[in-house]
Amino acid sequence: MSPETPDPEPRSGAAALELLVHGVGGATPQKMLDDPRTVRITGDETAAVYRRADDVDAELHPERYQGRPVPEAYCWSNLTSGNGSRALWLLLLPFMVVNLAHWMRPATKGLGRSQRLYGVLVRLVALTLTVLLTAAACEVALDLTAWQCAGSARCVADRSWLGFLSPERHGWWSQPGRRLALAAVVPTALVVLLWYLSNRTWSAYEAQRPPTDEPTDEPTGEPAEPTGGVSGDKAEKSAATHEAPGSDGAPAADESRAASDDPVTVRPALGRPGFWYGRRLVARLRAAHTAAGFLTVAAALTAAATDHDRSADSGTLDLLGLLLQAMLAGCAAVVLWVVCSRGRSERKRDGSLDKLLISALPATALGALALAVVHAAWSRPGWVSTGGLPGNVSFLVLALAQIALIVVLAVTAHVLHRRAPHPRIAMRGLGGPAVAMLACALGGVMTGGVAQRVADWLDGDATPGTGEGAIVGPPVLLSWQASVIPVLLVLLLIPVAVLGIRTVRAARRLAPLVEREYGKETADPLRTRQVAGVRARAELTDYAPRLVGVVSGASLLLGAGAVAGSWLSGQVPGEAAEGTDSFVESVADTAQSIGSWLVGLGFLLFITWGRRAYRDASARRTIGILWDVGTFWPRAAHPFAPPCYAERAVPDLTWRILSWTGRTGGRLVLSGHSQGSVLAAAAVWQLRTATRHRVALLTYGSPLERLYGRWFPAYFGAERLGQLSKEVHCWRNLWRSTDPIGGPVRVPEDGDRPEVDRGPLKDPLAYSRTVLHPLPEPILGHSDYQADPVFAEERAALLDRLPPAALPGQRGEREPESQGSSGRSSA
């Protein structure tokens, strides 16, 4: 149905539909529909729409629903907390965080090159995280195990499983190059595992077909980065004319259209047909990151072998090593080109795939790795492994690259924000760089944790890297990075203490307001403190940007200090401080010991949690809550991030709305709680104009403005939410001051459209015991909005404002071709 198609003529008497969408953590259809007997109407075991058993044939008996809508529940929690393999997603936490940074670009108009640069920088940071994870696996398998431990008779004596690698036995595997070649199986298997997880979820999530393949006939707001084949002024002109706002959104075509007298409706990014269909970009990035992983392993093998060949004056092998390094450098240049050359294009569903690229690039890198294995395993009788693995400077190079990229990213974000500042934007537009820094810090902690823990295990009672009886030790930089963790925790005590004091003062300030609100002349001090305390703690969410800024800023400075200390001293902190002031020396030793213990403990907790999540569905659901918040956005920066469930959920909701309105022409209230309200808003933006004007939106406990509007201003900023209010027929948002997640959407009254927000709702419903409430009422906070009578009141008001249903012969909506994977329909 085109936007020009008139709305159907009204007809009263048909049933209305309320489509419920739950929030984070999930909910059963029985709980959402308040009925133990539910029936799956359409969908599968992963995500489906349910009805009460008594409401299955509601369309055939509209007379039963004169005073209430037909309730349906869309359950999507299994998209993030399904089978036990989801526990493997814990490995992908840094990748998920850096992908969030990609979508935190400040909202602005113009500055297309700066916007494209922002996207490129985030993708490069994401690439360094893939290389960092692979380098960590190489450190454990190649350096600590195959090079250092297997090359030491003392270390092998306590570990019989390494006996066949010992030089004392003079076996085939005793040469260092062959030990490294064998150990390369471990990091290679890790890269293959990441590729497998990404490829499997790619076919289940990114490949979900949107309701239409046609490019929208409505103009775009901010176009995406042009493809690699277009450059310069031609690229910018092409982007401004055709492309949709995406990961690297370039300037809108507002300037060129300003001279026209015709009004132009600018479509937001989330309303583009290809926004929730990222097959092509994810496939390209997956090929590049897979190749980068293979190249990292090959580089570690080649660096060690060529270092020996150069010192031993092995002419032929040295030449082959140089040629191999040149090949690896060429492949790395291609990987960088792929990562930097293309962003997202969303004007239409892009069904094409760069098949040659996505197959040839990883295959070429794997072939280079095979050559590196053969080169390293070539017989070198005089080769002996001593000290650390030669050429093992990858961690230092990666740390320097990440610091430089974060700094440039911060400058770019500042430039973009300064063009269109808004007081509600988190951290004045620096949220993306701050979150990218946190992703790098998480990657560093995970890398240092696994290296320190394995070194501790291989070294027995000795302290790794100290030289006091130590057999093996990780790179010096990892010890410095571990040593700054205690310093960071001490620094964090300051903002935590400030927030604690602020919360106590806020509770005292709110206490009189609570008593006046309930009109209690004789108040209960305990009850008052309880309610005021909950409200004060709910306000802490608004201070999250400051805390994130402190953590990311301190991580950047301390990380730079760790790089400088390891570079200048070449020793671990304890040894570098020897001979200085006794206080400095004791602080350095303490920080190194505590830091090593903390990262090791963190690694053990990580493994324990992952194992428990693999076996325990309830623990897996807890992890799923984290993914509910972090994986709403498509994988536009890192292909190994956990998959975007919205690329399945949003098309599901859109198809359901289109199918029901197309078959019945009836009224529909889209009711979303918490994260479900974000999915509901995204689904509304995907609808055609005529359908949007027949839908009412009811949100409650919604983070649309409080979290998404502040942290993702280019997609949920004040202008976008105001536009959403105009596009739906009517919208109401309910919120409580005791809710730490939901809040007002801050869309004011506009002509005949009332203010969207209603709140704060009273919570608890009763201050003390009454005849109607003989037992103490709970403080609901973020849950059970339906328990408030205001909910039913506002839902009824929305239904009354919607136009009546249409006669079957007059419905203009085009019926979808299919109804999901199950093929069932509610009609």
Image: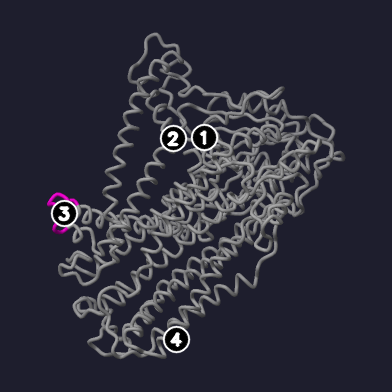
Mark 2 or mark 1: which comes first in sequence?
Answer: 2
Magenta segment:
578-587
Other-residue count near label 1 (Cα within 10 Å), few / some / many at <14 / 14–19 / ≥20: many
Main SS, magenta region, reads helix
- Looking at the rendered structure, the kind of residue marked 2 is Thr
Rendered location of residue 577, percent (x, y): 18, 57
Q: Measure the alpha-carbon separation of dots 3 and 2.
A: 40 Å
Mark in front: 4 vs 1: 4
Dividing the picture into quadrants, the one containing residue 578 is bottom left
The N terminus - image quarter: top right
- Looking at the rendered structure, the kind of residue marked 3 is Glu
Circle 2 SS class: helix
Residue 772 lies in the magenta stretch:
no
Mark in front: 2 vs 4: 4
Whether label 3 touches label 2, CB < 8 Å:
no
Mark 3 or mark 1: which comes first in sequence?
Answer: 3
* Residue topped by disc 3: 585
